Image (cartoon, rainbow, N blue to C red):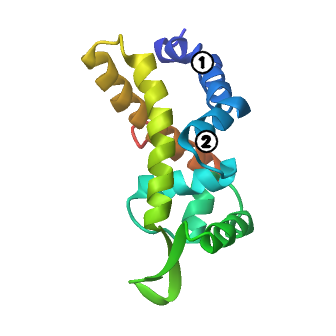
């Protein structure tokens, strides 16, 4: 049996369990309640994406990161814009295009929300040695990047060669 295949055999059930934990509706509700935020999950997802990007994004980039279609994002952006949580700014590379950025109000909202969620992670990892926490972050970032490359290739109808992702 292939040693690499043996090492990844149990990965999917753990990833599915993690996804289920992170997507529990009552956890999201608890997080927004603790943060004092009144936004639905897709709207908060947009804010977290914008915050993590550390730069304004095009609607299409947000949709890609959410894995939804553009009109779904646009509806939420219109609502967030009316509440002055996001703003549209000119694209420096194409003055006809607009990018989406957080307003100071939006930054405060996402900060309160991520503080609550990060607190849960901090508590869960509190007993882990520093090296284990560091390894988790490094390996999770690597896994996410490599899986993104792999799945993008599969969606495009090809498979990257070994060592590409």
Q: Secondary structure at mark 1?
A: helix
Q: Position of residue 6 (x, y in %)?
A: 53, 11
Viewer-nearest residue: 29 or 54: 29
Q: Residue at horizontal 68%, vertical 68%?
A: 79
136 sits to left or right of 99: left
Q: Report the disc number at residue 32.
A: 2
Relative to 118, say whether 39 is above or below.
Answer: below
Label 2: state its secondary structure.
Answer: helix
Which of pointers 1 and 2 indicates the residue nearer the eye? Answer: 2
Q: For the C terminus, give its image quadrant.
A: top left
- Determine crowd level at label 2: few under 14, some 14-19, many 20+ residues with C-alpha closer than 10 A: many
Q: Earlier in the sequence, mark 1 or mark 2?
A: 1
Mark 1 closeness class: few <14, some 14–19, many ≥20 residues within 10 Å = few
Q: Residue furthest left?
A: 131
x%, y% of residue 53? 42, 57
Q: Which mark is residue 14?
A: 1
Question: Gap between marks 1 and 2, in whole Å?
Answer: 26 Å
**Which one is nearer the viewer's eye here, 8 or 132?**
132
């Amino acid at each position: 049996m292939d040693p690499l295949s043996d090492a990844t055999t149990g990965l999917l059930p753990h990833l599915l369990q993690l996804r289920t934990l992170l997507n529990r509706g009552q956890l999201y509700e608890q997080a927004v309640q603790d943060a004092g935020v009144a936004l639905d999950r897709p709207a908060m997802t947009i804010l977290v994406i914008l915050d993590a990007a550390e730069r304004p994004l095009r609607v299409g980039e947000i949709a890609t990161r959410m894995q939804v279609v553009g009109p779904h994002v646009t509806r939420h952006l219109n609502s967030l814009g009316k509440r002055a949580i996001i703003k549209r700014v000119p694209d420096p590379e194409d003055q006809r295009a607009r990018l989406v950025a957080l307003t100071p109000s939006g930054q405060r909202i996402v900060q309160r929300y991520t503080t609550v969620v990060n607190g849960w992670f901090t508590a869960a990892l509190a007993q882990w040695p520093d090296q284990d926490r560091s390894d988790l972050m490094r390996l999770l970032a690597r896994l996410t990047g490599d899986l993104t490359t792999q799945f993008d290739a599969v969606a495009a109808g090809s498979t990257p060669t070994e060592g590409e992702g």
